[in-house]
Amino acid sequence: MKKYLPLLLLIVVVASCRSTWNEADDNTFNKACLDDANTWAGSHEKAGIYCNCVIAKVKQRYPDENDAMNHIKELTTDSTSLSCKALIMGK
């Protein structure tokens, strides 16, 4: 049993680090982001750059998409979106 303990721990760690985001989640988040960003970004290209930046940061911060959705209000006002906005404002 002792020789299987490290393997079991590795499986638990890897499983806990796995992202629950799937393609449908990405598409839904991206569409909502683009719908909003197209109203203020100035171009579809800038909106796309912004949304790609935001989703990458959100997925890094919240590997579980349910956690991200539970914190969506915070994400729109914290450094996640602000740093991505700064990325496109100079372009």
Image (cartoon, rainbow, N blue to C red):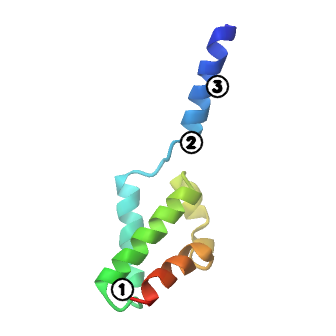
In the image, 9: left or right of 39? right
The percent position of residue 45, horizontal first and vertical second, equals: 30, 81
Q: Image quadrant of residue 27? A: bottom left
Regarding mark 2 in the picture, which secondary structure is present there? helix
Identify the amino acid type marked 3: Leu
Give the mark, 3 or 1, whose residue is nearer the N terminus: 3
Regarding mark 1 in the picture, which secondary structure is present there? loop
The residue tagged 1 is 38
The percent position of residue 58, horizontal first and vertical second, equals: 53, 63
The percent position of residue 16, horizontal first and vertical second, equals: 59, 39
The residue tagged 2 is 17
Determine contact: label 3, label 1, CB under 8 Å.
no
Identify the amino acid type marked 2: Cys
Q: Is residue 10 above or below residue 52?
A: above
Q: Is residue 11 above or below residue 16?
A: above
| Spatial separation of the CA atoms under disc 3 and disc 1 | 45 Å
Question: Which is more toward the observer, 77 or 80?
Answer: 80
Give the mark, 2 or 3, whose residue is nearer the N terminus: 3
Regarding mark 3 in the picture, which secondary structure is present there? helix
Would you call the spot at circle 3 few (<14 residues within 10 Å), some (14-19), or many (20 or more)? few
Question: Which is more toward the observer, 47 or 91?
Answer: 91
Q: Is residue 80 above or below residue 5?
A: below
Quarter of the image with the C terminus in it: bottom left
Q: Which mark is residue 77?
A: none
Would you call the spot at circle 2 few (<14 residues within 10 Å), some (14-19), or many (20 or more)? few
The residue tagged 3 is 9
Q: Report the residue that reaches farthest toward the top.
A: 1
Determine contact: label 2, label 1, CB under 8 Å.
no
Question: Which is more toward the observer, 25 or 88?
Answer: 88
